[in-house]
Image (spheres, rainbow, N blue to C red):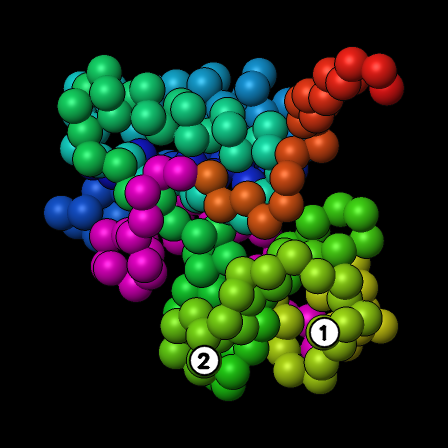
């Protein structure tokens, strides 16, 4: 049983996938956006309860590594590492943009080269480019939409947020934990270590150390 979850966007999601039957047993999305630290653990417990499972039934963990905001990613990745350590399970990190790309291709929403764009705030997007099969070719990067404006299909919330730059919007609009699980089980994505994919420094950083004044200055 594979437990998958992603906290790279405002909507926390989790799912349980049975690789033996190729079946998603349950997928849940948090009722409120943000509040990752409050919502992830209860969401995971609800998934397991709904699927009739115990944590000891799990065989692996898949987690979205971003790109995304510092706080949200930290919650997901610390949770993944903690569960993996306690239960002695393998953990697979996946670029969140790759999951959106796989779902778009497998669902028939795109059939040509395309981009995936998610909200990076500050009037910027996280962006990566993919071929028609959903294989990432460039990125991810954080950039202003106007600097990468294109008529190519653009998957993800970035297209609806910035239609003037991305007029050809396609679904899906948010990462799916179910598709994260399918992508890992089917080896449709690059499997990474469960480390955060930050593309900018956190907003909260330590102040630079003061240089002591030299004598006589």
Magenta part, dominant SS: loop
Circle 1 SS class: helix
Residue 172 located within the stretch drawn in magenta? yes
Circle 2 SS class: loop
Mark 2, other Cα within 10 Å: few <14 / some 14–19 / many ≥20: some
> The C terminus is located in which quarter?
top right
Q: Residue furthest left?
A: 20
Which residue does the image show at 31% across and 43% down from the upper left?
193
Across and down, in percent, residue 132 comes to 44, 82
Across and down, in percent, residue 22 comes to 22, 52
Q: Are marks 1 and 2 in contact (CB under 8 Å)?
A: no
Mark 1, other Cα within 10 Å: few <14 / some 14–19 / many ≥20: few
Find the magenta span and give its range: 168-195
Where does label 2 land, which residue? 131
- 96 over 165 or under it: above or below: above
* Residue 145 figure quarter: bottom right
Residue 107 located within the stretch drawn in magenta? no
Q: Which residue is more in the foreground, 45 or 144? A: 144
> The N terminus is located in which quarter?
top left
Marker disc for residue 55:
none
Which residue does the image show at 43% across and 70% down from the upper left?
136
Marker disc for residue 148:
1
Which residue does the image show at 49% across and 45% down from the upper left?
197
């Amino acid at each position: 049983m594979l437990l998958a979850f992603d906290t790279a966007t405002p909507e926390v999601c989790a799912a349980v996938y049975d690789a033996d039957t190729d079946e998603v047993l349950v997928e849940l999305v948090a009722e409120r956006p943000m509040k990752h630290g409050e919502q992830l653990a209860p969401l995971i417990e609800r998934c397991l309860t709904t699927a009739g499972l115990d944590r000891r039934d799990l065989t692996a963990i898949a987690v979205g590594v971003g790109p995304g905001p510092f706080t949200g990613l930290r919650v997901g990745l610390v949770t993944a590492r903690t569960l993996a350590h306690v239960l002695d399970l393998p953990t697979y990190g996946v670029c969140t943009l790759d999951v959106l790309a796989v779902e778009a291709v497998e669902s028939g929403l795109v059939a040509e080269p395309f981009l995936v764009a998610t909200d990076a705030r500050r009037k910027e997007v996280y962006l990566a480019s993919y071929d028609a099969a959903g294989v990432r070719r460039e990125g991810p990067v954080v950039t202003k939409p106007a600097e990468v404006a294109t008529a190519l299909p653009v998957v993800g919330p970035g297209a609806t947020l910035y239609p003037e730059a991305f007029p050809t919007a396609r679904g899906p609009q948010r990462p799916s934990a179910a598709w994260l699980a399918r992508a890992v089980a089917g080896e449709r994505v690059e499997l990474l270590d469960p480390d955060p994919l930050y593309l900018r420094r956190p907003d909260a950083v330590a102040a630079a150390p003061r240089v002591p004044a030299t004598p006589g200055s």
